[in-house]
Amino acid sequence: MECVTERFLRYVSFDTQSDENSTTCPTTEKQKLLGTALVNEMRKMGIADAHMDEYGYVYGTVPGDPTLPTIGLIAHMDTSPDASGANIKARIVPYTGEDICLNPEKGIYLRESDYASLKNHHGKQLVVTDGTTLLGADDKAGVAEIMAAAEVLLTSGKRHATLKIGFTPDEEVGQGADHFDVKGFGAEYAYTVDGGTIGEIEYENFNAAGAKVVVHGLNIHPGSAKGKMVNSQLIAMEFAGLLPVHQRPECTEGYEGFFHLTDMKGQVELSELQYIIRDHDMEKFLQKKAAISAAADFINRKYGEGTLELSIQDSYFNMKQCIEPCFFVVERAKAAMQAVGMDAKEVPIRGGTDGARLSYEGLPCPNLCTGGENYHGRFEYIPVEDMELCVKMLVEILTAFD
């Protein structure tokens, strides 16, 4: 039986970075290469119905005791566009508290002084990169842990629930649930295996929206611009200054929401700003959308109607209200964590998961830890021991029935 670490190291060798600017599904064809490999691997394991659909979603079933619930486990195959996912040079290093030299040639180190979470992993084996790419534990660790758990169910002879497996593309660009076949999946409830620190279970996520701001100006030769030039860049900066300074990601934590300027470009004639708006509390979320609309109205009153165009698009909502009526799904996961020696912790997600949208589509779907740290960056790492513990947790969820 192949261990979870071997699977993980194989999966991260696939470059599966998604593309937020693409209009295809999946947004990058290379995601299907990993999807195809997973289907082949599942079939060799004995998962007869393993397949990938036209959109790059991978599904499979491990049949179990028909008197038990049908439970889904879901992870995403793509990696974040925030850092390169190509040519990942992953290796395992023992950690005893010293600085880890990721790349001697470039002088790149992973240090406790920079990443305090390392203090929790003394004595463990860490999978790291060479400091030039992300690792891909988000979420290939989840994929590897689900596959390893499935193999345990197939080979151990233990009585277990029927397992429905789902691997999605494009989660990192907010499209992972776009074409997920909830009805065909056939689970009564599910878990996304897409979290971080060991022991965390998440069923509260941000309400989320995106905002696009387009500012129109007028360009005149600067030598004769007095009273005529309208510099859209300066107006865009003025607009940004109207939003609350302390409601930015770098000033918030926990349940605190924010406005985040993600992209900006401009010339005198035309400027564009892209924001994401986030808050766990629906009332505060609506207030944030009202605040950005009020700022746009102020600019148009000051400079003339049509100077600034604002469009706001909701992305997803807090799954808490979908989970609370069937809270046993959270309690089941917490019991499994405790049974395998994890300290179960309920924490709010300062982001979103496929599970948020799937919960609103009728599939209750909290999010479980994978053990990874420092996602979306070059200093991402994951302890081998924590991946192994997550596999035990998943098996416990599927086998612990009175």
Image: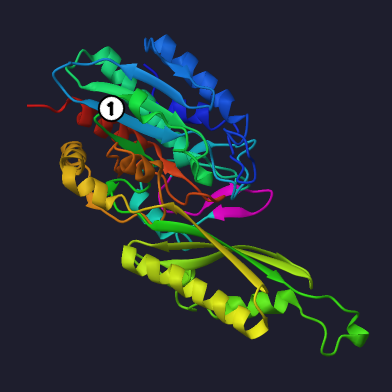
Residue 221 versus residue 66 in the image, above or below: below
- Mark 1 is surrounded, within 10 Å at the Cα level, by few (under 14), some (14 to 19) or many (20 or more) other residues, namely some
Q: Which residue is mark 1?
A: 187
Where is residue 373? Give x, y as percent: 43, 49
Residue nearest the viewer, comparing 116 with 216: 216
Where is residue 364? Give x, y as percent: 27, 39
Is 101 part of what is drawn in magenta?
yes
Q: Hey, what amino acid is under mark 1?
A: Ala
Describe residue 46's horizontal placement relative to residue 99 as left or right: left
Where is residue 128? Give x, y as percent: 51, 42
Residue 204 versus residue 17 in the image, above or below: below
User: In percent of the image, x 57 and y 25: which residue is there?
Assistant: 32
User: In percent of the image, x 66 and y 72: which residue is there?
Assistant: 306
Residue 343 visible in the displayed image: no
Q: Quadrant of the N terminus?
A: top left
Query: Main SS of the magenta segment?
Result: loop
Describe residue 209's horizontal placement relative to residue 81 as left or right: left
Q: Picture quarter containing residue 205?
A: bottom left
The colour scheme applied to this rendered structure is rainbow
What segment carries the magenta color? 95-109
Q: Quadrant of the C terminus?
A: top left
User: In percent of the image, x 54 and y 77: which residue is there?
Assistant: 295
User: In percent of the image, x 30 and y 17: which residue is there?
Assistant: 62
Where is residue 257? Give x, y as percent: 40, 67
Residue 306 versus residue 304 in the image, above or below: above
Q: How many marks?
A: 1
| Secondary structure of the residue carrying numbered label 1 | loop
Describe residue 1's horizontal placement relative to residue 17 as left or right: left
